[in-house]
Image (cartoon, rainbow, N blue to C red):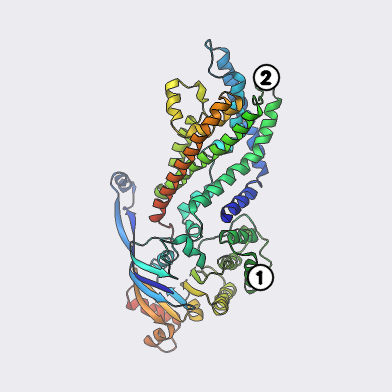
Amino acid sequence: MKAYVSIFKLRMANGMQYRIAALAGVATQLFFGLIFIMILVAFYRHSGTEMPITLPQLAAYIWLQQACLSLIMLWFRDNELFQLITTGNIAYELCRPTNIYGFWFSKLLAMRLSSAILRCFPVLFVAFLLPEPYRMSLPPSPVHLILFIVALILGLFILVAISMLIYVSTFITMSPTGSLLIFALMGEFLAGLTIPIPLFPVWLQNIIYALPFHWTADFPFRVYSGHISAHDAWMSLPQQLAWIIVLVGLGMLAMRAALRRVVVQGG
Amino acid sequence: MITVNGINKSFKVAKRTAGVGSAFKALFRREYTDVAALSDISFSIGQGEIVGYIGPNGAGKSTTIKVMSGILVPDSGTCSIMGYTPWLERVKYVKHIGVVFGQRSQLWWDVPVIDSFELLRDIYDVRENEYRSNLSLLTETLDLSGLLGTPVRQLSLGQRMRCELAASLLHSPSILFLDEPTIGLDAVSKLAVRDFIKVINKEKGVTVILTTHDMNDIEALAQRILLIGKGRLLYDGGVEELRGRYATDNASIEEVIVQMYKEYQIS
């Protein structure tokens, strides 16, 4: 266990060094947040029917997306791991007395958390100061806030478990580009990062709810804004846990199969 | 201590002739050839030995090292090292071995050497006093005191190799696998590395298996050599007997080896 904690700490310390990158990230996220909300505001203004989610709830949804970007985006990746596989440096990882799945999982968690810690607070701070309808709102109750944090953390585990499948696939394809593109594009769409899930047609929503992706972003954000009630959120947490177990189990099996026939590249 | 029996390992290699035409053909039908990297390799090594493992490029030296260190799974054959089968009980087994791949790095590129060492301490779960005594012994014999605080990317190759050696010995392994530890090093660093290998072999009783193309390494270190060519084990015995066998007057060890390669038609 110590090994996993230690790699987590080192990766955190390493990730927190990149201040300028974080600053650039904050500016980008503010820009995108504003643009997305502008589009949605225009969309709401000209729509006659009643919308399935209110505009303030939607603003919170978008700002949380932007603030938590590195916790929810599948394209946010650790190139070092891809290089380990494609250059053969994985040889060194394999002669350590650790479970590679757990080891990489801790690394990826730390990478995402360190990046999120640097970026989320400035984005949220500015978002709380903006004028209506762009302003970020507070959750309806402290209970929603706590449930949101729990759901976000469980969601992060789901996301990292999904991303582990991308890394494992690189053992076979030798290039991360393909799986990264497919996973990132599909994953983002199905997690509500392109269009918020409540705005989807009902038949598509039903498909999405059967898949793991929306648990990583859409679900925690709607818990925060109160679009999902505290009771429903509480009842849904076991489903998140179940997805973690399924995806981690799948990833471990895939990793074991990949390692059994691993070829260490480059002599 | 180490018994290897009848190990076979082959790799699938995709083949095609040059040019766009055949690249296009390979889109639909890919041709593979099986390359036998190891065929029927057997030997045993006792505790405290230093064994030189030699052979031309592509002979299968690194593959053997990787099989013995639990990284690759052979197609058939058995291997028992300290009672473990490396690829079956990888996590338990690798605690007892240290590995250095001369062409790769196990140190974290962007952080000072000492951070990598501490990570390794946690990965191998080395007790604090054991770690300290090992570190001070290694710092002294490898002359690392000025290097520990330097980021790895700013070390010269010789300096880095000394740190790599230290890194692989922090957990007091009983067996040390060295895959071309002197590659690319200048005369001074080479001598330092050789002396160091002798010291840890004598003082700590570490069994050392090293591959190299530098016959002076062999002459300085090994009492016994294994010669491998085209995946087959061709010679297993003392350095002196070998010299006796090809006793042309005062031939250097280099010339003896070349003669031997010629005789076995593996050069």
> Looking at the image, do the residues carrying marks 2 and 1 touch, with CB atoms under 8 Å apart?
no
User: Is residue B167 depicted above or below A131 in this figure?
Assistant: below
Secondary structure category for the residue under label 1:
helix
User: Where is residue B231 drawn, in percent x and y?
Assistant: 34, 68
User: Is residue B202 depicted above or below A194 in this figure?
Assistant: below
- 2 and 1 marks on the same chain: no
* Residue A170 in view, yes or no: no
> In the picture, residue B90 is in which quadrant?
bottom left
Disc marking residue A132: 2
Q: Nearer the viewer, residue A12 or B107?
A: A12
Amino acid type assigned to the residue bearing label 1 in the image: Ser
For the residue carrying disc 1, how many other residues have a C-alpha within 10 Å: few (<14), some (14-19), or many (20+)?
some
> In the picture, residue B248 is in which quadrant?
bottom left
Point out the residue furthest to the right here: A129
Q: Is residue A243 left or right of residue B156?
A: left
Residue located 63% across and 31% down the image = A145
Disc marking residue A149: none
Residue located 60% across and 32% down the image = A148
Task: For the N terminus of chain A, give its image quadrant.
Answer: bottom right
User: Where is residue A177 drawn, in percent x and y?
Assistant: 45, 42
Q: What chain does badge 2 belong to?
A: A
Disc marking residue B136: 1
